[in-house]
Image: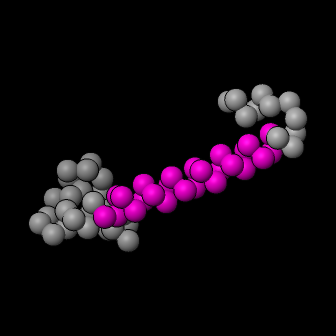
Amino acid sequence: MAIRNISDPVKRVTAANGAIAETQRLAAEYAAITRDAVREMRETMSYGEIAKRLGVSRTRVQQLEK
């Protein structure tokens, strides 16, 4: 990983923290996209149908919706 190769430890920490923040931001964004899509599917499909289409359990679909 490029961050690991930064020789200055202060710059390495700053870069790592920036990468962590961006990863968390992206995770939140993707979770919202997933949640919205599952809620949209729920308008016309059961949890079981969604689970089958996504290849996950019904419980996981319910988790994704929340």
**Magenta highlight: main SS:** helix
Residue 40 seen from this side: yes
Q: Is residue 8 left or right of residue 63?
A: right
Verify whether residue 34 appears in magenta. Answer: yes
In this picture, residue 66 sits left or right of residue 41: right
The residue furthest left is: 44
Q: Which span of residues is magenta-colored? A: 12-36
Residue 46 appearing in the image: no
Residue at (38%, 71%) from the top-left corner? 66
Q: Quadrant of residue 39?
A: bottom left
Position of the N terminus, as image quadrant, is top right
Residue 65: in magenta span: no
Q: Residue 10's spot in the image, x, y percent? A: 87, 43
Q: Residue at x 55, y 56 (%)?
A: 25
On screen, 23 above or below 49? Answer: above
- Residue ID at (31%, 64%): 36
Instruction: Judge left or right: residue 47 versus residue 32.
Output: left
Q: In this view, does 20 lie to the left or right of 56?
A: right
Return the x and y of residue 63 as percentages of the image width and height.
Answer: 37, 66
Camera-nearest residue between 66 and 48? 66
Nearer to the camera, 6 or 65: 6
Whole-percent x, y for residue 13 in the image: 80, 45
Question: Which residue is more in the foreground, 7 or 31?
Answer: 7
